[in-house]
């Protein structure tokens, strides 16, 4: 078992107080909460919560057992609001009910999914008829009540799931008075593809391909976290060279995302030239990806035990492209920061306060813009980050759209710097080490920082070394619940802008 | 005044007649080869012959008559991983600039000639996809874009997906790739318009 994971079994009734004590005494942050069905080996379900302690590299992982005679447990959401969605997800996927949860509605499944059906249970089955009815969506088996705002002059704008642009599907209900948004209710999980269950039907090695396709623009981060989890579980140490290549590609992924996002924000304010410039630079980087890896989204590189291609063979191409990008990017930032009409729209729009961000366990760019120094590259150093990553101060206090843009800009600079450093360094070793044996009945965490925030994978193997459970948590899953808070009090036309500033993935969140 | 009303009536009649004739052409257009799936990427022996394609769209003239040399696309994400969307977005950037070919993405299915669907069709998106398909005008050309959309791709066999767009709505064209690059998409769309 990896050194920085401390598992501790606690009683079902003490779990809540134990977690709250962790948060208070150690300033721990909830990273992940999930259940497993271990009825075959241990005759029980287990619920795990992963906390990371501030200032150390330790993950505290308390867990408790749930026997089949009583499948309810005391919700911890009232003490740790960040657990809100995790508990609802556990309820949907396993049928373990969090008692006293403030919002006990279903999260993942929509109205026409059968009530007592829980896909992640090992003995789960569903009839053809139920599947058909689920797709048709006509029978409302478990009605979902949207919160309604009442009062004089309040009206509701329903949007989605199919939106006007080329974006992913989600349903929003905006309650507004005049132009001002009073409340935004989001309905997600339209793109739920049953990925966690799908992992269980593959071998660990095949799973890399699936991990790459959880969220398109975080392809490499997801596959890195997944491979890392499996490697840690199997006790495999990858070579320095493989580590360097992974770190390099993670930063490259961050770079193209951030520059693309900064440009894309301009689409929300009507600054076409900014959008065009941003997408042009992004395209340049995507083409670099293509030349390096034969995939514009960095697919097919990660494998368990290392990487498949030595991208440092293209060092000249890389430095040339990065130099050009750096120059163009500088021009873009000058243009944006000089456009008063653009900046004015960004400032004071979509403010997410630090207090709320902390409580909701927000991660990544959104957290940094709200004054929280949340970066898993420095708090839990992995790959070669401990050598090259200088935890600069990315954090800003404002928490508005502008702060999120600037947090991205700071990270962009840092990524370019790191890319240069990695290219100039010497990295010894093979590309891959042998990784055929997956030990039975083991488990481990894998994590890294995607362009949006931290991503986590927790894997567990069964008696034959095949996946028993693969839990994944993308940054979008923690950040989506914070969007309605940021949007409250803004005007309706600013909604797309605020949304773009978070730039969350639906697919990664909906799994 | 009466004259005006009369004129109006006549023009309305004409409009109806015109509409009828137009829908007739559109009808023949899709009915000649209903639900045929043409994969332009396949090798010569697998590929549908040129005649086959021509029966669906007999050449440039018919295309141009119906769509007026332009193609308006409504893109729908039916549960993709989002990479396919970004490639579609890239089509509108200054480098690919797909508008110069008369191709553009529109906001409403009611304005669309083509429905470009990405993703394997997750069951929770099925209804929305069908409704979008219903809302668009005939001939309702559907393109399945990406391996997922063609047969479910990597997600094939999962309980929550329909294993491809053709299991939800009839598909006319396929664009393979995971994701297909903007160049490939452009090429396929132009082929569809019989420009190259
Ligand atoms: S075809 Fe590939 S890129 Fe496109 S949605 Fe499917 S997995 Fe993503």
Image (cartoon, coloured by chain):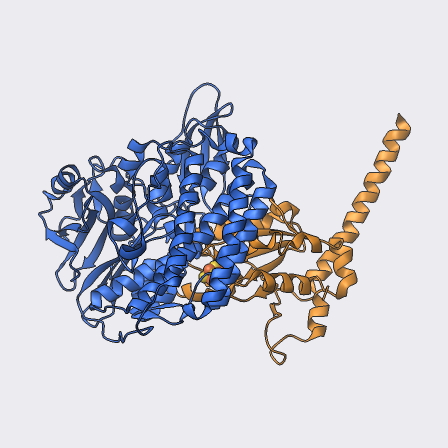
Q: Position of residue A191 (x, y in %)?
A: 43, 52
Q: Position of residue B86 (x, y in %)?
A: 52, 54
In the picture, which quadrant includes the C terminus of chain A? bottom left
Any part of residue A347 in sight: yes
Residue furthest to the right: B3
| Image: A431 above or below A112 | below
**At 61% across and 63% down in the image, what residue appears?**
B172
Any part of residue B119 in sight: no
Label the orange chain with its letter: B
Position of A53 with respect to B21 (left or right) is left
**At 46% across and 32% down in the image, what residue appears?**
A174
Shade of chain A as shown in the rendered figure: blue
Position of A335 with respect to A425 (left or right) is right
Q: Position of residue A369 (x, y in %)?
A: 37, 37
Please state which of residues B187 and A339 is positioned toward the viewer in this rendering. Answer: A339
Please state which of residues A260 and A331 is positioned toward the viewer in this rendering. Answer: A331
């Amino acid at each position: 078992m990896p050194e920085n994971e401390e598992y501790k079994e606690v009683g079902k009734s003490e779990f809540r107080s134990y977690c709250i004590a962790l948060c208070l005494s150690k300033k721990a942050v909830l990273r992940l909460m999930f259940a497993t069905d271990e009825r075959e080996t241990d005759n029980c379900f287990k619920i795990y919560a992963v906390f990371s302690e501030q200032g150390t590299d330790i993950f505290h992982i308390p867990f408790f057992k749930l026997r089949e005679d009583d499948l309810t447990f005391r919700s911890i959401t009232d003490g740790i609001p960040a657990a809100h969605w995790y508990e609802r997800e556990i309820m949907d996927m396993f049928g373990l009910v969090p008692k006293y949860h403030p919002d006990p509605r279903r999260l993942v499944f929509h109205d026409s999914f059968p009530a007592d059906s829980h896909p992640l249970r090992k003995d789960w089955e569903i009839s053809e008829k139920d599947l058909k009815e689920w797709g048709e969506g006509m029978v409302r088996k478990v009605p979902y009540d949207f919160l309604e705002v009442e009062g004089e002059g309040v009206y509701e704008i329903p949007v989605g799931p199919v939106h006007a642009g080329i974006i992913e599907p989600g349903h929003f209900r905006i309650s507004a008075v005049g132009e001002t948004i009073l409340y935004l209710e989001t309905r997600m999980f339209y793109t739920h593809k049953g990925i966690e269950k799908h992992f269980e039907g593959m071998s660990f090695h095949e799973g890399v391909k699936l991990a790459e396709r959880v969220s398109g623009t975080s392809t490499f981060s997801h596959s890195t976290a997944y491979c890392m989890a499996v490697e840690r579980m199997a006790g495999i140490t990858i070579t320095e060279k493989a580590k360097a290549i992974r770190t390099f590609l993670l930063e490259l992924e961050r770079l193209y995302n951030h520059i693309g996002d900064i440009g894309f924000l301009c689409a929300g304010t009507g600054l076409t030239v900014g959008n065009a410039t941003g997408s042009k630079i992004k395209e340049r980087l995507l083409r670099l990806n293509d030349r390096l890896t034969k995939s514009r989204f960095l697919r097919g590189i990660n494998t368990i035990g290392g990487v498949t291609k030595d991208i440092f063979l293209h060092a000249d191409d890389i430095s040339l492209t990065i130099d050009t990008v750096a120059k163009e990017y500088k021009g873009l930032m000058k243009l944006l920061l000089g456009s008063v009409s653009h900046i004015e729209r960004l400032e004071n729009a979509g403010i997410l306060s630090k207090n709320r961000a902390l409580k909701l366990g927000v991660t990544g760019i959104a957290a940094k813009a709200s004054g929280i120094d949340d970066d898993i590259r420095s708090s839990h150093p992995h790959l070669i980050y401990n050598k090259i990553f200088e935890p600069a101060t990315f954090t800003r206090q404002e928490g508005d759209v502008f702060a999120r843009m600037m947090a991205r800009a700071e990270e962009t600079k840092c990524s370019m710097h790191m890319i240069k450093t990695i290219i100039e360094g010497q990295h010894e070793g093979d590309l891959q080490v042998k990784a055929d044996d997956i030990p039975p009945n083991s488990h481990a965490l894998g994590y890294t920082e995607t362009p949006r925030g931290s991503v986590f994978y927790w894997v567990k193997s069964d008696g034959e070394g095949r996946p028993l459970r693969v839990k994944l948590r993308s940054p979008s899953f923690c950040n989506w619940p914070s969007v309605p808070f940021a949007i409250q009090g803004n005007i309706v036309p600013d909604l797309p802008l605020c949304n773009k500033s978070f730039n969350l993935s639906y697919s990664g969140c909906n799994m | 005044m009466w004259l005006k009303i009369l004129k109006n009536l006549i023009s309305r009649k004409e409009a109806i007649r015109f509409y009828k004739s137009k829908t007739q052409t559109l009808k023949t257009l899709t009915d000649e080869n209903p639900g045929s799936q043409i994969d332009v990427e396949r090798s010569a022996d697998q590929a549908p012959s040129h005649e086959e394609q021509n029966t669906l769209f007999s050449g440039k003239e018919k295309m141009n008559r119906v769509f007026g040399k332009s193609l308006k696309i409504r893109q729908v994400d039916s549960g993709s991983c989002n990479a396919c969307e970004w490639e579609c977005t890239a089509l509108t950037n200054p480098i690919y600039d797909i508008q110069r070919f008369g191709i553009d993405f529109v906001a409403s299915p009611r304005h669309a000639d083509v429905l470009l669907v990405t993703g394997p069709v997750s069951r929770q998106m099925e209804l929305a996809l069908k409704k979008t398909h219903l809302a668009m005008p005939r001939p309702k050309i559907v393109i399945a874009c990406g391996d997922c959309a063609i047969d479910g791709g990597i997600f094939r066999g999962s309980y929550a997906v329909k294993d491809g767009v053709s299991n939800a709505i009839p598909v006319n064209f396929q664009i393979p790739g995971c994701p297909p690059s903007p160049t490939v998409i452009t090429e396929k769309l132009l082929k569809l318009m019989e420009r190259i």
